Image (cartoon, helix red, strand yellow):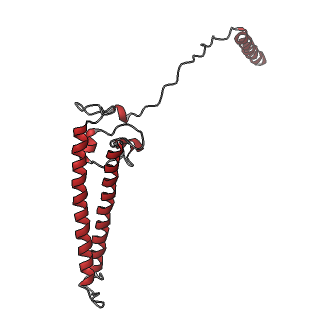
């Protein structure tokens, strides 16, 4: 049995020698191709029949004027809403006497008036925040920067501005939008 082991080892040695004498395979020459820029998949995806909104034409004066009127109207609506909610909250406070807090066993809750007042105040603050955004959009119209995404510098699609005239970002850059995943 010893001779068979030696014959196997000599076969292994001869196969190693033949492998080392073979010419190495030719390596392809490295190419110096330009790197391709990373493009968001979202910018290429459109629904069937929907226009490609990645490159919007400049807005005409008529569109800007319609947007200005919509913003002024929305600002007035939100200001009225804020004033009404603030007045409701104030009236709840005025109509209440110091000892009016009532706790009973059935409801398990305390002062419902205080809860309603806090809700009115929170909604009033939300309306005022919307007014601030609208006023900023009106300032952008005056500055000539209305409809420019503050993240990418690209035009915000016309349809988005028609839906939300005070929008400052394209959908893909909005927090929680398609581009943030």
> Residue 103: image x %, image y %?
29, 87
Is 134 located above or below residue 123 in the figure? above
- Image-quadrant location for residue 67: top left
Say left or right for 154 vs 97. Answer: right
> Residue 164: image x %, image y %?
27, 48
- Image-quadrant location for residue 40: top left
- Image-quadrant location for residue 26: top right
* Nearer the observer, 1 or 177: 177
**Count of all numbered marks drawn on residues in the image:** 0
* Residue 181 visible at all: no
> Residue 124: image x %, image y %?
29, 67
Say left or right for 2 vs 106. Answer: right
Residue at 35% across / 42% down in the picture? 144
* Residue 11 visible at all: yes
Residue at 29% across / 91% down in the picture? 99
Residue at 33% across / 57% down in the picture? 132
> Residue 172: image x %, image y %?
37, 41
Residue at 72% across / 14% down in the picture? 16
* Nearer the observer, 156 or 59: 59
Is 87 located above or below residue 127 in the figure? below
């Amino acid at each position: 049995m010893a001779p068979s082991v030696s014959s196997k080892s000599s076969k292994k040695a001869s196969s190693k020698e033949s492998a080392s004498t073979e010419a190495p395979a030719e390596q392809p020459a490295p190419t110096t191709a330009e790197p391709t820029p990373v493009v968001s998949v979202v910018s290429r995806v459109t629904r069937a029949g929907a226009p490609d909104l990645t490159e919007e034409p400049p807005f005409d004066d008529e569109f800007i004027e319609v947007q200005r009127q919509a913003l002024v109207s929305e600002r007035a609506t939100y200001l009225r809403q804020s004033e009404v909610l603030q007045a409701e909250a104030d009236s709840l406070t005025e109509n209440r006497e110091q000892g009016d807090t009532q706790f009973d066993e059935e409801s398990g809750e305390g002062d419902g008036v205080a809860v309603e007042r806090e809700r009115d105040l929170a909604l009033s603050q939300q309306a005022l925040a919307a007014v601030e955004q609208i006023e900023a959009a009106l300032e952008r119209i005056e500055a000539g920067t209305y409809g420019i995404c503050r993240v990418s510098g690209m035009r915000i699609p016309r349809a988005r501005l028609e839906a939300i005239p005070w929008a400052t970002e394209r959908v893909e850059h909005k927090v929680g939008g398609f581009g943030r995943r």
